[in-house]
Amino acid sequence: MNLLISIMMLAATPPVTIYDFHADVDIRNWIIVDDVVMGGRSSGSINLTADGHGAFEGDVSLANNGGFSSVRFRPAGINVGVHNKVVIRLRGDGKRYQFRLKSNTRDYHSYLAHFDTNGEWQEIEIELSDMYPAFRGRKLSIPNFSHEDIAEVAFLIGNKKEEEFRLLIDWIVLR
């Protein structure tokens, strides 16, 4: 009986919005971090489209040992609670991206999951417990994400090749 009650409570729990892009949203708190921080030459940007979607786009360059572009946002006080997955509505360009989380902005490492885009609008579902810790592209020997809070979310492209990219983001929620 307790399992049934737990399942019913989880089903009745509304999603928690991490970010909802729309025509009137202020995106100045989204920050680009490219490989230029270590001498690379990649160039990304985040803009709001006329339809109210976040557009993370640019060029990844391998020059000077570069190879990535990312965009980051630090939400105010996101508690995971009973939620066990992140769901993102987005439209990519057929390329592979990473979704990243931090539970503490002072941590060097992030928890990440890869996802592939198909050129159409998609809802990407990522189990929080599947997000593994990594730092500078190396997986760490510490447990996967199991924290109560989310202090930063990010998208990163770094496929070890030079490429243009464009990722439209509609919303990010916890379910």
Image: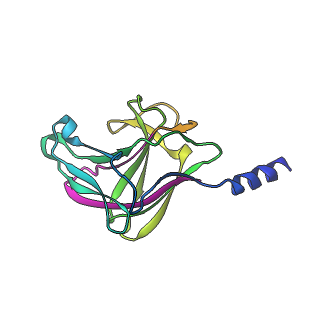
Residue drawn 41% across the image and 28% down it: 106
* Farthest-out residue, right: 1
Can residue 105 be found in the magenta stretch?
no
User: In the visual, does 47 lie left or right of 9?
Assistant: left
* Residue 109 picture quarter: top left
Report how many numbered discs are placed on residues in the image: 0
Q: Is residue 18 visible?
A: yes
Q: Is residue 145 visible?
A: no
Q: Give the vertical position of 106 relative to 111 (above or below).
A: above
User: Where are the magenta residues, as a range?
Assistant: 152-175
On the image, the x and y values in percent for residue 46 come to 29, 54
On the image, the x and y values in percent for residue 50 come to 32, 68
On the image, the x and y values in percent for residue 43 come to 20, 50
Q: Give the vertical position of 53 relative to 108 (above or below).
A: below
Residue drawn 15% across the image and 45% down it: 41
* Farthest-out residue, left: 63
Residue drawn 19% across the image and 40% down it: 36
* Farthest-out residue, top: 106
User: In the visual, does 4 lie left or right of 65?
Assistant: right
On the image, the x and y values in percent for residue 135 come to 36, 34
User: In the visual, does 143 lie left or right of 6?
Assistant: left
Residue drawn 49% across the image and 31% down it: 142
* Farthest-out residue, bottom: 120
